[in-house]
Image (spheres, rainbow, N blue to C red):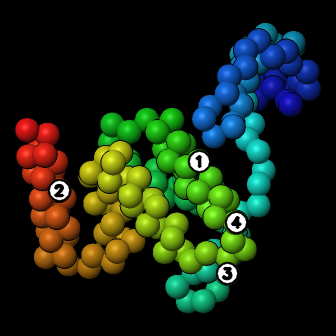
């Protein structure tokens, strides 16, 4: 592992932690410049090919999914860690399905569900693109559904 600051090849691990998905975070110190940095390890499991709406297939791209979610969460109080957890959860669910191919709709539905819990504004932003909400009435209808769900949740808690 190269130091991201000075590119030296040797570092020392000073702390290791694990998360619920089996990922490992290692805190390191460069033996040359003495600066600290973190590395993340995650198991590489087979992810299915994604069947797009036009019928083409492409490899699951974790970074592409991360970019889309980050755009939806831009300027929202959503931490990078929460986005990483959502992407990890979606990727893990796809791997656990054990299928060679899945529809892009499956991926989108999982992201939509995760964003709905994470941040409702980010959910609406993502839904505008993903669900093809192409006019104000469609966006308003989706917001109304969200508000109805909130009202039901509040009445169930009372």
Say the numbered circle drawn on residue 57. 3
- Quadrant placement of the N terminus: top right
Residue at 16%, 64% (x, y): give it: 145
Left or right: 20, with 148 as reference point: right
User: Which is nearer the eye, 76 or 60?
Assistant: 60
CA distance for labels 1 and 4? 16 Å
CA distance for labels 3 and 2? 35 Å
Q: Circles 1 and 3: CB distance less than 8 Å?
A: no
CA distance for labels 1 and 3? 21 Å
Residue denoted by label 4: 98
Say the numbered circle drawn on residue 88. 1
- Residue reaching furthest to the bottom: 54
Say the numbered circle drawn on residue 149. 2
Please provide percent x and percent y for residue 133: 27, 76
Q: Circles 3 and 2: CB distance less than 8 Å?
A: no
**Disc 1 or disc 2, which is closer to the eye?**
2
Q: Residues within 10 Å of mark 2 (few under 14, many from 20)?
A: few
Indicate which disc, 2 or 4, sits on the residue closer to the N terminus: 4
- Give the secondary structure at mark 1: helix
- Quadrant placement of the C terminus: top left
- Give the secondary structure at mark 4: loop
Left or right: 124, with 153 as reference point: right
**Disc 1 or disc 3, which is closer to the eye?**
1
């Amino acid at each position: 592992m190269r130091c991201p600051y000075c590119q030296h090849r040797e570092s020392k691990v000073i702390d290791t932690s694990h998360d619920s998905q089996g990922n490992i975070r290692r805190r390191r110190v460069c033996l040359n410049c003495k600066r600290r940095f973190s590395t993340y390890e995650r198991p590489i499991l087979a992810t299915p090919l994604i069947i797009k709406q036009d019928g083409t297939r492409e490899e699951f791209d974790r970074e592409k999914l991360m970019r889309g979610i980050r755009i939806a969460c831009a300027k929202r109080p959503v931490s990078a860690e929460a986005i990483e957890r959502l992407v990890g959860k979606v990727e893990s669910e796809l791997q656990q399905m054990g299928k060679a191919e899945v529809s892009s709709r499956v991926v989108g539905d999982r992201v939509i569900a995760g964003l709905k819990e994470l941040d409702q504004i980010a959910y609406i932003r993502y839904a505008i693109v993903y669900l093809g909400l192409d006019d104000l009435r469609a966006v308003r209808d989706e917001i109304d559904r969200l508000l109805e769900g909130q009202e039901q949740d509040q009445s169930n808690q009372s």
